[in-house]
Amino acid sequence: MTPADAMLPSTPPRRPVVSSAVLGTLFFVVAEVMFFSGAISAFTIARSGAAPGTWPMPGQPRLPAEATALNTALLLLSGIVLAVAHRLYKKQSPIAHWITLCAWGLGAGFVALQGVEWAGLLGSGLTLTSSPLGSFFYLIVGAHAAHAVVALLALGWAWLTMARGTLNPGFFFGTQTFWYFVVLMWPVIYARVYF
C-alpha cells in the first residue's frame, strides 16, 4: 500500500439488497408451499382413489363450502387492505397504522369464523380420526390456521410498532410476505379441500 492509497477514503460496507427478515421469510414461505403442495397432493390422491360412495364416508358431515366463502372473502380483503397499508406507510401517511389494524381485524375475523366452523364440524362428528376426510381436513386446514395465527401475531406487532413510530421496514415487509402467503394459499386449499 502506498502512502497515496492510505489517504483514500475507505468504501463503506455494502448493505444487503434484501433484508434478513425478508430473506428468511422467503425461504420459510418456499418451504411451506412445498409442505402444503405435498399435503394437498396426498389429499387429492386419497380422494380420487376412494371407492364410489365412500368419500366422504357415509354419516360424515359435508364441509360447509358456502359458509366458508365468507371467511375466504374476509381473508382476501385483508390482503388487499394490507397492500393499501403498505403504500400508505411508504408515503408516511399518519393513517397507515389504522389501515394495518383493519387488515389485522379482517384476518382475525377469518380465524374466528374458521374456529366456529371447526366447532360445528366437530359437533357433527367430523374429527381427526373419524375418516380420511377428517384427517386431511384438520391437517391441511389446521396447518393453515396455525400459519394464520402466527402471521396475525407478527402483523399485530408490526401494527403496534408502526403506531409507536418504531417499525423496522424490513420486518414490515417480511410480515407482509408471510401474510400474503397465508392469504394466497387459502383459495388453493379452499378449492381443493372443500369442493
Image (cartoon, rainbow, N blue to C red):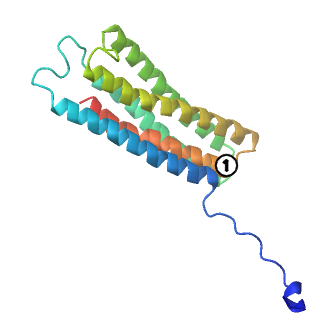
State whether residue 119 appears in this view: yes
Q: Residues within 10 Å of mark 1 (few under 14, many from 20)?
A: few
Measuring 48% from the left and 21% from the top, which residue is drawn there? 112
> Is residue 53 positioned above or below 178 on the image?
above
- Reading the image, the residue beneath label 1 is 93
| Residue 33 image position (x, y, % from top left) | 41, 44
Badge 1 amino acid:
Ser
> Is residue 191 positioned above or below 119 on the image?
below
| Residue 109 image position (x, y, % from top left) | 49, 26
Q: Quadrant of residue 120?
A: top left
Quarter of the image where the N terminus is located: bottom right
| Residue 94 image position (x, y, % from top left) | 69, 45
Measuring 48% from the left and 46% from the top, which residue is drawn there? 29
Measuring 63% from the left and 37% from the top, which residue is drawn there? 98
> Is residue 168 positioned above or below 118 on the image?
below
Measuring 88% from the left and 85% from the top, which residue is drawn there? 6
Q: Quadrant of residue 190?
A: top left
| Residue 47 image position (x, y, % from top left) | 20, 30
User: In the rendered view, does 73 fall on the left or right side of 192?
Assistant: right
User: In the rendered view, does 27 fall on the left or right side of 21?
Assistant: left
Q: Nearer the viewer, residue 17 or 86?
A: 17
